[in-house]
Amino acid sequence: MGVLRIILTILFVIVSIVLTVVVLMQEGKSAGLGVISGAAESYWGKNKGRSMEGKLVMITKILAVAFLALAIVLNINF
């Protein structure tokens, strides 16, 4: 069980670092002047899920779930 705990701890640290980097790579949610001119309804606004920003959001969600799951598993005293 000691080896499994070490592996999970190393995985936890890696997920933490990658999650931090991915969150820092994302753009801010402030709309700016694009909302006033209607730029949010453009092609890029409608297809944001297929862009790099959409992929970063999906990766963030997956890493956050993995972070939470690993934190719970590592908190169990086995």
Image (spheres, grey):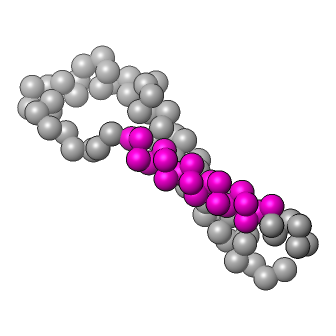
In the image, taking residue 78 as reference, residue 71 lies left or right, namely left
Q: Which residues are magenta?
A: 7-26
Residue in the image at 33% along x and 39% along y: 27
Quadrant of the rendered image containing residue 54: top left
Taking depth in this image into account, of 71 and 37 the one nearest to the observer is: 71
Q: Quadrant of the N terminus?
A: bottom right
- Is residue 49 visible in the rendered image? The answer is no
In magenta segment, residue 24: yes
Where 1 sits versus 44, above or below?
Answer: below
Quadrant of the rendered image containing residue 42: top left
Residue in the image at 38% along x and 23% along y: 47
In the image, taking residue 51 as reference, residue 43 lies left or right, namely left
Where 63 sits versus 43, above or below?
Answer: below
Q: Residue furthest top?
A: 43
Residue in the image at 75% along x and 78% along y: 76
In magenta segment, residue 39: no
Q: Position of residue 61 (x, y in %)?
A: 53, 48
Q: Position of residue 29 (x, y in %)?
A: 27, 44
- Is residue 3 visible in the rendered image? The answer is yes
Residue in the image at 30% along x and 26% along y: 45
Q: Position of residue 44 (x, y in %)?
A: 32, 21
Q: Position of residue 30 (x, y in %)?
A: 21, 44
